[in-house]
Image (cartoon, rainbow, N blue to C red):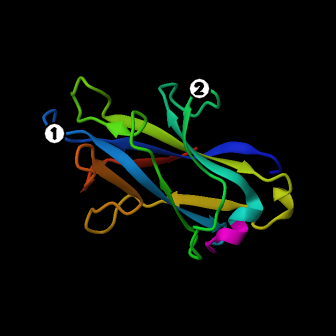
Amino acid sequence: MDTWVDDILSVKAEHLGTSGAGSGWFATMTLGWQDSSGGSLGSSAMTALFNSVKVFWDEGNDGYGNGTDTCIATITTFGSVTDSGTMTIDLPKGTSTRLWPAGNPDGPATKTYTVVVDMKSNASSQLPETLVVTISESGPNGSPTGVRYKEWETNTDMFMSGTDTVSA
């Protein structure tokens, strides 16, 4: 586990609007961090384990590839991780996060993002030995809780269903 860099979670974001709908962007991703027994990892545990947590945009090679995909967010300080193990990552507005309605010739409706961790050199001597990372797909009323999309022109929240998570 020491000085280990690996992809731990992939997220597929998809715009399911009709071709006449406007584009949107994948604005935030909220992750939950736990140990194997379900206990939350707070900022102290995250600081002890990780040099960084990064989000990469998969540019078409159908999976994370270091050096072939674009890093769009890097977290190196973990003070914003809540006691319940929640970390919200703001994603940049740009080509890497813009999603178009299906059938629109201006761009893709689906993009895949991968969360990658860079473990500290002494991570194997830290606790926990096993961790679980999750993203909440939607709340009981269908509203997004683990992801937030915004309308491209106005930056107002919008709902684009179809966000899937795939463990890496």
Magenta-span inclusion, residue 39: yes
Residue 161 in view, yes or no: no
Q: Which residue is mark 2?
A: 68
Q: Quadrant of the C terminus?
A: top right
Between residues 116 and 140, which one lies in front from this camera angle? 116
Where is residue 91? Give x, y as percent. Answer: 46, 48
Residue at horizontal 86%, vertical 57%? Answer: 122
Q: Secondary structure at mark 2?
A: loop
Residue at horizontal 68%, vertical 51%? Answer: 52
Q: Secondary structure at mark 1?
A: loop
- Density class for disc 1 (Cα within 10 Å; few <14, some 14-19, many ≥20) is few
Residue at horizontal 47%, vertical 26%? Answer: 60
* Image: 41 above or below 54: below
Where is residue 90? Give x, y as percent. Answer: 47, 53
Q: Earlier in the sequence, mark 2 or mark 1?
A: 1
Where, by quadrant of the figure, is residue 152 drawn? top left
Q: Which mark is residue 81?
A: none
Three-letter amino acid code at the position of disc 2: Thr
Left or right of 124 on screen, residue 41: left
Q: Which residue is mark 1?
A: 21
Magenta span: helix, strand or loop, mainly?
Answer: loop
Where is residue 97? Give x, y as percent. Answer: 40, 40
* Residue range corresponding to the magenta coloring: 38-45
